[in-house]
Image: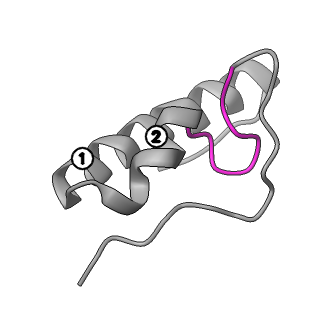
Amino acid sequence: MSIPSPCTNVCRMSPDTGWCEGCQRTIDEITRWSRTSDDDRRAILAAVTERREWLAEASGVVTRA
């Protein structure tokens, strides 16, 4: 089973971070998603998780694991 895309259909690039405001991927990560390996997809998802944590910290939102 393939790893699903983290796309949330909020496709707008942030000028501050360079990440999509919906899924927190870069343009490169978005464009290569459909033709990349599951290992690369896992690496992208790990980066997305780190970005979301960074965004939460930067905005003052407290998250719990």
Tell me if residue 32 is in the magenta stretch.
no
Q: On the rendered structure, is 58 left or right of 49?
A: right
- Judge whether 37 appears above or below 29 on screen: below
Viewer-side residue, 28 vs 4: 28
Which residue lies at the image location 41% right of the left edge and 54% below the top edge?
Answer: 33
Q: Nearer the viewer, residue 38 or 32?
A: 32
Taking the magenta stretch, the answer to whether it contains residue 24 is yes
Q: Is residue 41 left or right of residue 18?
A: left
Q: What span is colored magenta in the figure?
A: 18-25
What amino acid does circle 2 point to? Glu
Q: Earlier in the sequence, mark 2 or mark 1?
A: 2
Task: Decide: few, some or many residues near mark 2? Use Cα within 10 Å; few <14, some 14-19, many ≥20.
Answer: some
Q: Residue 3: give x, y in percent of width and height.
A: 33, 70
Residue at disc 1, secondary structure: helix
Q: Which mark is residue 40?
A: 1
What's the residue at 28%, 42% (across, down)? Answer: 43
Above or below residue 5? Residue 29 is above
Question: Disc 2 marks which residue?
Answer: 29
Instruction: Tell me residue 1's x, y (percent).
Output: 23, 84
Q: Magenta residues: mostly which secondary structure?
A: loop
